[in-house]
Amino acid sequence: MSLLVVGSVAYDALESPYGKVERTLGGAATYFSVSAAFFTHVKLVAIVGDDFDPKDEAMLRKRSIDVEGLERANGKCFFWAGRYSENLNERVTLATELNVFADFKPRLPVNYCDSKYVFLANIAPDLQRDVLHQVKCKPALVAMDTMNYWIERTNAELRETLKHVDVLMINDSETRQLSNEHNLLRAARHIFKMGPSTLVVKRGEYGAMLVDKHGMFCVPAFPLEEPHDPTGAGDSFAGGFMGYLASAKSKSDAALRRAMVFGSVLGSFAVERFGLDRLLTLKRSEIHARARHFAKLTQFKL
Ligand code: AMP
């Protein structure tokens, strides 16, 4: 089942107490695609500049990520630089250079227009809506991410996009900001009135929580002794979540619960090394072994 993603493909400069990289492939849509491609075929919509390394394109193709929707433009790729605190919980953005991303007008290749699963990664809400309008048959599931920047600056556009979305996947502070509610369950009720029927709150080292009309489900973050770089953890979570659902062709409560676990599994691998390094050496057998480890970690008898 094909899964479409629109979002950033970028070069990142990353600094954490565990080291530093000057320039490495990143971007929300990249982390999402690489993670989701362990489960299903992915169609990528994004823009890159003429500095996009052919080796990076080859890496995406090798993973059966369709790059027909990866537009090339004159100029430089989106560039982002960030530095993490000692405990990795806080980060400061040192640079955001939009470059070719500034004039991005997503255009879907014809064979993308019947995608059944759609993920709108963190970009301007009117671009997210524009992509959705180009998908001709009604998708089985549409999920999206956003961030404080869009909540503050383009709230009306964001509200319009939310009307067309099934699953909103954001972090806890974004949930509180969007809903004006501190309590996450009350926040979920508020967000359901905006359009989504499911809210997935990503809570970093505290795991993730799904709330929908059936109730809620919580998954821990996999305990790691030495996480190196949290960049892209949320996007990798989304990739594992959506990739699993697309492969399962189901939106049942049981499938959503398994999707939460696969999301947390991919997020946990993403943070083990800098940038995409760990995801690029990851094997399917390791994903399934860690999912089984999650089952053990959370199992108990009453
Ligand atoms: P995350 O750690 O989930 O926030 O994702 C980090 C990735 O998102 C990095 O690889 C960045 O290149 C990319 N990124 C950072 N800021 C933005 C932005 N404003 N819009 C789109 N992508 C971004």
Image: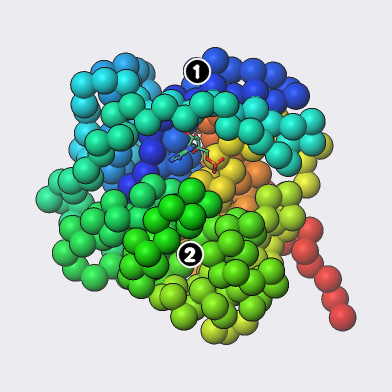
Residue depicted at 64% across the width and 78% down the height: 186
Above or below: residue 55 compared with residue 265 = above
Residue under label 2: 168
Say what amino acid the circle numbered 1 marks: Arg
Q: Residues within 10 Å of mark 2 (few under 14, many from 20)?
A: many
The outermost residue toward the right is 302
Is residue 201 in view from this perspective? no
Q: Nearer the viewer, residue 32 or 291?
A: 32
Q: How many marks?
A: 2
Residue 116 in picture, x, y percent from top left: 29, 63
Q: Residues within 10 Å of mark 1 (few under 14, many from 20)?
A: some
Q: Nearer the viewer, residue 184 or 298?
A: 184
Residue depicted at 64% across the width and 59% down the height: 172
Does 32 sit left or right of 103 as displayed? right
Above or below: residue 34 compared with residue 158 = above
Task: State the separation of the CA atoms marked 2 and 1.
Answer: 30 Å
Residue 259 in picture, x, y percent from top left: 54, 62
Residue 147 in picture, x, y percent from top left: 50, 51
Does 10 sit left or right of 87 as displayed? left
Say what amino acid the circle numbered 2 marks: Leu
Residue depicted at 33% across the width and 67% down the height: 160
